[in-house]
Image: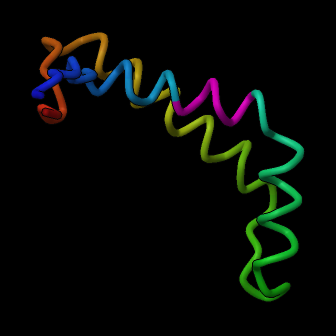
Amino acid sequence: MNHSIPALTEKEYFIKQLTFIDDNYQDLNSLYLSSTPLKERKKDFLSNYVSEVEKYITLCNQAPAEPLCEKY
């Protein structure tokens, strides 16, 4: 049986990622802090990451939507 799953555009992919981060922010931040050595930690890592992804989504709005990859 071959079920075709529609491919996500880059914008859709990153929006889903931001939604996941928003829904799980506390757990993800705790995991980051507990698994990253003190010297390697970046201040406000998740907030900075979210900001960068939001900037990228803005760029995606200016380009034609193309699927990242096909899944079969």
The x and y percentages for residue 35 are 78, 78
Magenta stretch: helix, strand or loop mostly: helix
Q: Is residue 40 above or below residue 24?
A: below
Identify the residue at image location x=61%, y=35%: 51
Identify the residue at image location x=17%, y=34%: 71
The x and y percentages for residue 29 are 83, 54
Q: Please, which residue is most extreme toward the front here?
A: 1
Location of residue 26 (image quadrant): top right
Q: Quadrant of the N terminus?
A: top left
- Horizontally, residue 55 falls left or right of residue 63, namely right
Identify the residue at image location x=81%, y=63%: 31
The x and y percentages for residue 68 are 18, 33
Q: Is residue 63 above or below residue 25?
A: above
The x and y percentages for residue 11 are 35, 21
Which of the pair 7/51 is nearer the observer? Answer: 7
Q: How is the image coloured?
A: rainbow
- Horizontally, residue 70 falls left or right of residue 48, namely left
Q: Which residues are magenta?
A: 17-22
- Horizontally, residue 36 falls left or right of residue 5, namely right
Q: Quadrant of the C terminus?
A: top left
Q: How many marks?
A: 0
Which of the pair 68/2 is nearer the observer? Answer: 2
Which of the pair 55/12 is nearer the observer? Answer: 12
Identify the residue at image location x=49%, y=22%: 15
Location of residue 10 (image quadrant): top left
